[in-house]
Image (tube, rainbow, N blue to C red):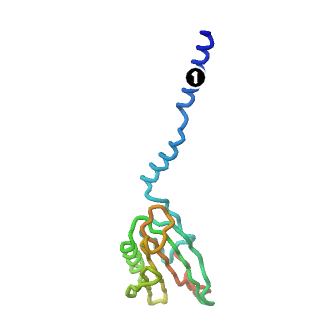
Amino acid sequence: MIMKKTLFALAFASAMLAGCGQKSADEPAKTAEAEESTQGAASITTLSTPLPDGMVLPFRYHVRADRMQPLDEKSQLRLIDIDVLDLDKTAANREIGKMLSKAGFRGSSPSPSKGGTRITYRRPDGGKVSVIIWDKQGRKVHAHGAKSSAYLGWTVPVGPEAPTPAL
């Protein structure tokens, strides 16, 4: 009888010690929460190709879509759809405007469009970017923690006269 109790106690103690080195079921969730708090609300995803003229979006974002659509034989439209992670609609609009202004674009007056705000930016060389930006109540965001979303329609020349994008 004493032998059975000793074996049982030894087996129980071994099982307990073996479990001490393993993560519990809710430990991965704690690790993910810790990573999220140090990295922000969601990870940054990158655009399929860099923006023209070496421009970089000056905030954290999550790419919903980034694709090209032909317009005519001389140009195509690059459609960039993003969730903005840390900035509300007003701040994101201001930062996009600053980025484009540094590249020589001038913005039109804001106008309502599809529940958001549209500004069209033009440059003397014919460059054009249409921006529509929404707060998260005006358009559903997909990235966890996103505060706004934006849609940039970038007219891009094609053919032999098209400038080579800056990398």
Q: Quadrant of residue 159?
A: bottom right
Residue 52 x, y percent position in the rendering: 50, 77
Q: Nearer the viewer, residue 133 or 164?
A: 133
Helix, strand or loop for disc 1? helix
Number of numbered discs on residues = 1
Q: Quadrant of residue 6?
A: top right
Q: Nearer the viewer, residue 37 or 122?
A: 37
Q: Is residue 145 left or right of residue 70?
A: left
Residue 154 x, y percent position in the rendering: 52, 81
Residue 51 x, y percent position in the rendering: 51, 75
Q: What residue sits right under mark 1 in the picture?
A: 12
Q: Residue at x 44, y 87 (%)?
A: 123
Residue 87, above or below 78:
above
Q: Residue at x 55, y 35 (%)?
A: 22
Q: Residue at x 57, y 28 (%)?
A: 18
Residue 30, above or below 117:
above
Q: Nearer the viewer, residue 83 or 106?
A: 83
Residue 106, above or below 36:
below
Q: Nearer the viewer, residue 167 or 113?
A: 113
Q: Residue at x 60, y 21 (%)?
A: 11
- In the image as oriented, which residue stretches furthest toward the top? 2
Q: Is residue 163 left or right of residue 108?
A: right
Residue type pointed to by label 1: Phe
Q: Residues within 10 Å of mark 1 (few under 14, many from 20)?
A: few
Residue 34 x, y percent position in the rendering: 44, 48
Quarter of the image for the N terminus: give it: top right
